[in-house]
Image (cartoon, rainbow, N blue to C red):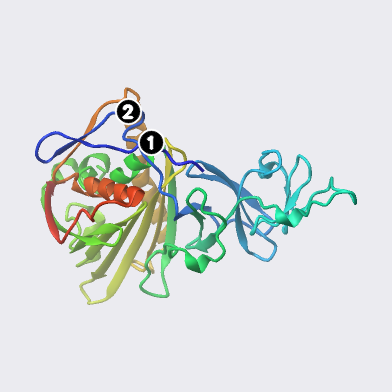
């Protein structure tokens, strides 16, 4: 679980402009450990079942024991290094295919070494395979990936809170989306928070047209480990927002990879409704990442087929971002120098500053108070 020692060093090139030094696949993207990341959808993981995933370059085996408890292990037997996923899981223990070593998957403790005889004095229970804290939340298996050398985590209560989708009522509908991106996590995240690409990447009859672009002003404020686009009326050039009456939206970005959006609306009859989403961009490897979106809402709750309709158009929306990242990856193969401008790219600059502060432990929050930004989109 080694960390890269290569730090991203922006090269300043005049007022309001930052050039990012060229690097393979874009700016160097160090991964932030000591955080919770969504590994996979857990709501379809049945008792006795397992699935594999990769988080921050670490191959993982996830499963659900017979009692319903989730587990996450490094997909590696500590004996000879064969993937544990090549072996067997009986609902209680994971057994390695190579020599039959058997592990309790939640703790990683070795329960049996079949080759031992009465002449051996090795105690199997003193051997541990790597296991990780895992919590099921909003249908996802969230895995805590500790810093290298941090040792085993004894209690989840000592860890940061597991992210959760905001909800504002007991009755709501949900949907989730996922897309793999062929870029490093930094490119995925700054694309996620980019406010100016909408009229171009998401140009569609059901969202917005290319000629709807106009000047916008938004206020941002600092929050712990991130920043907030303060409560505001959402963009009038996005068709779905116009159906909501008088909506007010708030958008938060929080390290290492989370974008929360909440929309509260009041219709013409004075009835309140809401929509919320949590979008994450998770590093899979040093050069690939994955975007996950989970949303909940009570808007149009009684409309038939509202969930498949939302999933269809949401899939189209995320697919547009995914296609753009695929095309961007082609350009990044030539290792170009890149740049960030003011004001539209200011959130990206804040993200890089916050990330460097987290990685180095040095520096102040890039926002000292509310900031007004202007751009056209």
Sequence-first disc among 1 and 2: 1
Q: Which of 174 and 217 is in front in this view?
A: 217
- What percent of the width, then of the height, locates residue 358? 33, 52
- What percent of the width, then of the height, locates residue 101? 76, 48
Q: Residue 263 is drawn in which quadrant? A: bottom left
From the viewer's perspective, is 273 left or right of 143?
A: left
As displayed, is residue 317 above or below residue 111?
above
Element type at mark 2: helix
Q: Residues within 10 Å of mark 1 (few under 14, many from 20)?
A: many
Q: How crowded is mark 2: few (under 14 residues within 10 Å), some or many (20 or more)?
A: some
Element type at mark 1: loop
- Evaluate whether residue 305 shows in this view: no
CA separation in Å, label 1 and label 2:
9 Å
Which residue position is annotated with label 2? 332
Labelled disc at residue 280: none
Report the residue that reaches farthest toward the right. 118
Q: Evaluate if marks 1 and 2 touch, with contact meaning CB atoms under 8 Å apart.
A: yes
Residue at (24, 42) in percent of width and height? 203
Q: Nearer the viewer, residue 142 or 31?
A: 31
Report the residue that reaches farthest toward the top. 334
Residue at (48, 66) in percent of width and height? 158
- What percent of the width, then of the height, locates residue 316? 36, 45
Residue at (71, 55) in percent of width and height? 126
Which residue position is annotated with label 1? 183
As displayed, is residue 170 above or below residue 105?
below
């Amino acid at each position: 679980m080694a960390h890269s020692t290569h730090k991203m060093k922006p090269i300043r090139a005049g007022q309001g402009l930052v050039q990012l030094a060229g690097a393979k696949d874009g700016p160097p993207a160090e991964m932030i450990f000591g955080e919770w990341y969504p590994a996979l959808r857990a709501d379809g993981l049945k008792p006795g079942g397992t699935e594999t995933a990769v988080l921050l370059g670490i191959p993982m085996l996830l499963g659900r024991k017979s009692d319903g408890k989730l587990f996450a292990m490094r997909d590696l037997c500590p004996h000879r290094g064969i993937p544990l996923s090549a072996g067997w899981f009986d609902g209680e223990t994971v057994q390695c295919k190579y020599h039959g070593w058997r592990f309790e998957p939640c703790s990683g403790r070795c329960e049996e070494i079949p080759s031992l005889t009465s002449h051996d004095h090795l105690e199997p229970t003193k051997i541990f395979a790597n296991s990780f804290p895992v919590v099921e939340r909003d249908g996802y298996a969230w895995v805590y990936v500790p810093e290298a050398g941090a040792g085993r985590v004894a209690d989840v209560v000592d860890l940061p809170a597991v992210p959760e989708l905001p909800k504002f009522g007991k009755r709501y509908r949900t949907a989730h989306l996922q897309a793999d991106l062929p870029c490093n996590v930094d490119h995925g995240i700054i694309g996620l928070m980019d406010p100016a690409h909408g009229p171009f990447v998401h140009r569609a009859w059901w969202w917005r047209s290319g000629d709807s672009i106009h000047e916008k002003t938004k206020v941002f404020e600092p929050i712990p480990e991130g920043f907030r686009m303060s409560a505001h009326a959402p963009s009038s050039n996005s068709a779905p927002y116009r159906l909501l009456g008088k909506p007010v939206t708030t958008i938060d970005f929080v390290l290492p990879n989370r974008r929360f959006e909440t929309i509260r609306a009041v219709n013409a009859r004075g009835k309140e409704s809401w929509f919320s989403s949590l979008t994450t961009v998770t590093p899979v490897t040093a050069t690939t990442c994955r975007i996950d979106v989970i949303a909940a809402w009570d808007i149009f709750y009684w409309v038939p087929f509202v969930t498949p309709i939302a999933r269809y158009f949401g899939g189209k929306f995320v697919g547009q971002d995914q296609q753009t990242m695929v095309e961007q990856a082609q350009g990044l193969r030539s290792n170009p120098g890149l740049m960030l401008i003011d004001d539209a790219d200011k959130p990206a600059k804040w993200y890089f500053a916050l990330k460097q502060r987290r990685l180095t432990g040095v520096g102040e929050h890039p926002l000292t108070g509310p900031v007004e930004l202007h751009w056209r989109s």
